[in-house]
Each structure stands twice: as structure tokens, then as C-alpha cells.
């Protein structure tokens, strides 16, 4: 099988490519390097002994997409490419809809023209909206997110459902990720946010490495075990393996299939900090700050469906997640900028 991985130089895509290559899949990456670096390919080579074929380009470039499908016998597409910063999406909605929605439609059109109809999409728990019934399960209705990034994910899910309804020969898997953290255990690839991180784990590791002064814990008056928010953190290696399991399932199941990819367990922000301190063997500088607008108090996945149908579940725990995040950060203080 030959897998086209859009956004394969990014955080989740690069870890998935490593696992694909290890399993013997021919892997082709399409990435415009908007939020990643070409050196990722070298690191994938160092880990796997193989360099994926690489096209530097944009998912909105129809001509390029048609060429990729002409030049290669692509059998499946895993679609990670897109923009993912919630705050930026509020300020620049057109940019987000253009890349995420138009880019996805363009990719699907090129697939259709090439008669490649097996598609795995990176969706997000954000499509459950703000519903209070926890854990989130795939049978729940979705709820329109309040920001353009989340909306773009929900709209693409709906577009894919319409497509599968109209054309019965598509096999489409929607993977709803919870909170991906961690890095490859080698420390050769990991999350490399540009500028000041928005997400918890890279913020913690950048405080620990001395780039940032103190972590602001957003809210400690929530109705949770210790007053801080609860999230379902999932190690990026487990998440990557979830894509391989989905690829297998997708080969023999048509229509749209939806899976939560989470651990099925919530951890509070203070638990993450104390686990980090065990790994770091020092105290982490943090302070309590007001709640962040839009944050939900607590949610985690019901991950039973993936366990039952994909035969997939997480194996790595919170300790592994913070250990590998710190391993990556401490070996690469400036990320991929050497
Ligand atoms: P990332 O930014 O690290 O990776 C995305 C990759 O896509 C980058 O390498 C970027 O250069 C590339 N890209 C962006 N626009 C492109 C375009 N127009 N054409 C070609 N390539 C383009 O993000 P990630 O964390 O690896 O996320 C991967 C996917 O998973 C995204 O679709 C994201 O929305 C989704 N997701 C991520 C999270 C998370 O917390 N990281 C959670 C849920 C869903
Ligand atoms: N968080 C925090 N300080 C930070 C970043 C995040 O306290 O600097 C908290 C945030 O309030 C949320 C959790 O960590 O409860 C996870 O946030 P993140 O942005 O990583 O992911 P989200 O759950 O928003 O997708």
C-alpha cells in the first residue's frame, strides 16, 4: 500500500510516518512547510532508515495534487495538513476556511479524479462542542464549535458524510483526537511550536528549559478534584498507532466511520505538573491565573469503540508522555532550529 500523508512533516504526521514506514508502507509526504521544517525528513530517516518521498507544496494546488496521483500508485490518504491555532482562527477566519476546507475539498477532488477513495481525516474532540455529558462518545450529536478552527473540523466532517452518502465507494475514517502530547522516544522528532506555545505541554517544557518564566495555570476554581481543568492526554506514539489501526479498518469498511482517539482517562493540570516534576526532579515554576475564555472544565474520551473495532488502545501513560516531551525538549532546546 502507498500512503499519501498530507502534513506529514508536522507534529502528529511525522510520528505517524515513522510508524507507517516501520510497518513497511510506502509513504509519500505532501507538506508546504508552513508549520514544519524539512529537517524532519532527515530525522525520520535517522529513526527508520528510510526517507519518505517528499513533495513540498500546498493542498490547495490542484495541479500538484493531480501530478502526485499520476506519478504514484497512491492507495490511501491520511490528511493531517491544515491550520490549527484557535486564537488565530478567530482573527483570520478566511485563512482557516481556505486552507482547511477548500484545501480538503481540493484534495478530495484530486483523489476522486485518480479513483483513490480511502481517506483518513484528523478531526478533533472540539466537534463535541461544549456538551456537559462526559465522557464524549461517538454516538453523541456533534455541536457547532464557537470558533472557526473547530467549525472547519466539523464542516469537513459533514462534507465527508455527504460525500460518502452520494458515492458509496468511499471509505472514510474520522479520527477525533483528544489532547496529543509526548514525542518519539528517540527525542529526534517532537512538537515544535512557533513562538510562545498556546498548548500546555510545550509551555511546561519551555519553562523547564528556561525559555519561559512560569506556567500560568488557567483557573483553579473549577468543580474538579483539584480545581484545575481535566483533559484526556494521549501520547503521540499511541495516536500514530491509532492511524495504522484505522488504515487497516478503512481497507475493508466503506462509508464513514468515526473513532475517538483518547486514553479514556482524564488528568488534571496539577496532576500533569506533579508528574512532570517527578521526571524533571525539580519544581516547575507555575502560578494560578484566571480561567482562559472558552476552556471547558473537564472532558475525556470514551475510547471503547476504537478498542473494539480497531483493536487499538493506548499503552503509554502520563509519565511516559511527560518523560518523552521533556526528552525531546531537552535534546532540542530550540526545536528543529539547530
Ligand atoms: P502541525 O501544524 O504540526 O502539522 C500540520 C502540517 O500541515 C504542518 O507540517 C504544516 O506545514 C502542514 N500544512 C499546513 N497547511 C498546509 C497546506 N496548505 N498545504 C500543505 N501542508 C500544509 O499540526 P499537528 O498538531 O500535527 O496536527 C495535525 C492535524 O491534526 C491538523 O489537521 C490538526 O488540526 C489536527 N488536530 C491536532 C490536534 C493537536 O492538539 N495537535 C488536536 C486535534 C486535531
Ligand atoms: N493550560 C494552562 N496553561 C497554559 C496552557 C494550557 O493552564 O499555558 C490548560 C488549559 O486551560 C486547558 C489545558 O491546559 O485546561 C489544555 O490546554 P491546551 O491548550 O493544551 O489544549 P486544549 O484542551 O485547549 O485543546
Image (cartoon, rainbow, N blue to C red):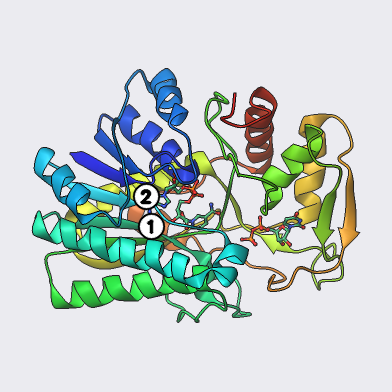
Disc 1: residue Cβ within 8 A of ligand 1's nearest atom: no
Q: Which residue is drawn at 26% across and 47% down?
A: 248
The part of the image, by quadrant, that contains residue 235 is top right
Determine the secondary structure under disc 2. Answer: loop
Of residues 128 and 316, the one nearer the viewer is 128
Q: Residue at x 57, y 79 (%)?
A: 146
> In the rendered image of this protein, does residue 245 appear above or below residue 169?
above
> In the rendered image of this protein, does residue 104 appear above or below residue 57?
below
Of residues 130 and 274, the one nearer the viewer is 130
Q: From the top left corner, tell me how far across and down residue 62 is, in percent.
A: 21, 56
Q: Residue at x 45, y 24 (%)?
A: 43
> In the drawing, does residue 113 fall left or right of residue 264?
left
Q: Which residue is drawn at 18% across and 51% down?
A: 63
> In the drawing, does residue 31 fall left or right of residue 211?
left
Q: Mark 2 points at which residue?
A: 311
The part of the image, by quadrant, that contains residue 86 is bottom right
Disc 2: residue Cβ within 8 A of ligand 1's nearest atom: no
Crowd rating for badge 2 (residues with CA inside 10 Å; few <14, some 14–19, many 20+): few
Quarter of the picture holding the N terminus: top left
Quarter of the picture holding the C terminus: top right
Q: Mark 1 points at which residue?
A: 308
Q: From the top left corner, tell me how far across and down residue 321 is, in percent.
A: 63, 40
Determine the secondary structure under disc 1. Answer: helix
Contact between marks 1 and 2 (CB within 8 A): the answer is yes
Res. 117 visible in picture = no
Amino acid at each position: 500500500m502507498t500512503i499519501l500523508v498530507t502534513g506529514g512533516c508536522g507534529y502528529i504526521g511525522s510520528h505517524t510516518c515513522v510508524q507507517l514506514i516501520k510497518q513497511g508502507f510506502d509513504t509519500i509526504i505532501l507538506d508546504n512547510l508552513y508549520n514544519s521544517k524539512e529537517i524532519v525528513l532527515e530525522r525520520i530517516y535517522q529513526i527508520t532508515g528510510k526517507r519518505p518521498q517528499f513533495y513540498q507544496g500546498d493542498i490547495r494546488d490542484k495541479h500538484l495534487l493531480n501530478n502526485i496521483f499520476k506519478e504514484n500508485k497512491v492507495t490511501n490518504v491520511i490528511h493531517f495538513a491544515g491550520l490549527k491555532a484557535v486564537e488565530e482562527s478567530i482573527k483570520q477566519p478566511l485563512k482557516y476556511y481556505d486552507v482547511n476546507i477548500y484545501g480538503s475539498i481540493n484534495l478530495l477532488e484530486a483523489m476522486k479524479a485518480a479513483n483513490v477513495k480511502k481517506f483518513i481525516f484528523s478531526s478533533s474532540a472540539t466537534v463535541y462542542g461544549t456538551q456537559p455529558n462526559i465522557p464524549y462518545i461517538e454516538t453523541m450529536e456533534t455541536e457547532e464549535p464557537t470558533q472557526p478552527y473547530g467549525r472547519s473540523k466539523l464542516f469537513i466532517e459533514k462534507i465527508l458524510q455527504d460525500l460518502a452518502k452520494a458515492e458509496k465507494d468511499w471509505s472514510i475514517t474520522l479520527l477525533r483526537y483528544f489532547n496529543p502530547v509526548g514525542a518519539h522516544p528517540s527525542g529526534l522528532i517532537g512538537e515544535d511550536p512557533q513562538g510562545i506555545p498556546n498548548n500546555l505541554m510545550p509551555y511546561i517544557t519551555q519553562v523547564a528549559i528556561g525559555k519561559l518564566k512560569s506556567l500560568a495555570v488557567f483557573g483553579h476554581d473549577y468543580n474538579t478534584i483539584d480545581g484545575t481543568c481535566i483533559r484526556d492526554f494521549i501520547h503521540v506514539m499511541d495516536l500514530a498507532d491509532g492511524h495504522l489501526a484505522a488504515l487497516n479498518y478503512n481497507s475493508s469498511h466503506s462509508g464513514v466511520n468515526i473513532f475517538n482517539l483518547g486514553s479514556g482517562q482524564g488528568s488534571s493540570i496539577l496532576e500533569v505538573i506533579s508528574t512532570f516534576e517527578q521526571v524533571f526532579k525539580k519544581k516547575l515554576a507555575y502560578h494560578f491565573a484566571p480561567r482562559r475564555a472558552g476552556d471547558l472544565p473537564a472532558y475525556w474520551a470514551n475510547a471503547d469503540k476504537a478498542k473494539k473495532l480497531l483493536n487499538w488502545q493506548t499503552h503509554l501513560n502520563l509519565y511516559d508522555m511527560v518523560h518523552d516531551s521533556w526528552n525531546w525538549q531537552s535534546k532540542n532546546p530550540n526545536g528543529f532550529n539547530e
